[in-house]
Amino acid sequence: MLYQEDFKVGAWRESTEPYLVTEEEIIEVGRRWDPRPFHIDRDAASDSLFGGLVACSAHLFAIVSWLAHHMEQPTAGVAGLGWDKIRMHAPVMAGDRISCKVQCLESRPSGSQPGCGVITVYNELYNQRDELVYTAQCSFLVERRPEP
């Protein structure tokens, strides 16, 4: 388990396995959260500027959350505090295998929650061609290492 003290500014972590994006999932998430034609309709999507179905931004947010839980060591996370600078750099399509790289930007004890710290990280998602598809900066409340 990684605690706040384990996060060193500048250090990178990577997901241990890629996330396979399926056409069915793109449609399911799109129908529920962003029902634009290029997320839910194969024919309309093929005529769009994307040339096919693409994952919506809510889907990418869910994928980065899933990948964060599939790092080599789990984090003793308590709560998300905020997401900033979210960017979609390239479309994510069915068949893409998405991986995650995370860099620690800040790690400090919490001023208001004893036993916790705050970490701020920069997330990058890449497809199987090593193309950057998504970035975001986020902050989390994380447990501090328990005293023996």
Image (cartoon, helix red, strand yellow):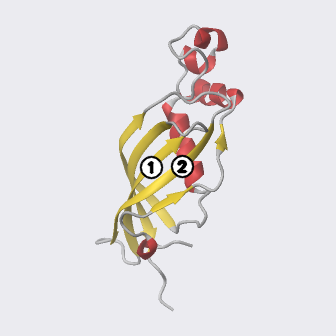
Q: Which residue is mark 2?
A: 100
Hey, which quadrant is residue 51 in on the image?
A: top right
Question: Is 146 left, or right, of 81 in this rendering?
Answer: right
Identify the residue at image location x=54%, y=49%.
Answer: 100
Q: Residue furthest front?
A: 129
Q: Nearer the viewer, residue 67 or 76?
A: 67
Which picture quadrant has residue 1?
A: bottom right
**Residue occupying the point 58% across, 26% down:** 30
Residue 61 pos. (x, y %): 50, 41
* Amino acid type indicated by mark 2: Cys
N-terminal of the two: label 2 or label 1?
A: 2
95 up-or-down from 3: above or below = above
Residue 24, position in %: x, y? 71, 28
> Which secondary structure lies at badge 1?
strand
Q: Do tag 2 and tag 1 residues touch (Cβ < 8 Å)?
A: yes
Viewer-proximal residue, 79 or 84? 84
Q: Amino acid at mark 1?
A: Asn
- What residue is disc 1 on? 123
Left or right of residue 18: residue 60: left
The answer to whether 134 is drawn above or below residue 144 in the figure is above
> Against 65, is 25 above or below?
above
Are there few (<14), some (14-19), or many (20+) residues within 10 Å of tag 1?
many
Binning the other alpha carbons within 10 Å of mark 2 as few (below 14), some (14 to 19) or many (20 upward) gives many
Residue at (55, 20) in percent of width and height: 35
Identify which residue is drawn at 48% across, 29% down: 90
Element at badge 2?
A: strand
Residue 4, x across and y down, in percent = 43, 72
Number of numbered discs overlaid on the protein picture:
2
Q: Is residue 26 above or below residue 44?
A: below
Q: CA distance from mark 2 to mark 1?
A: 7 Å
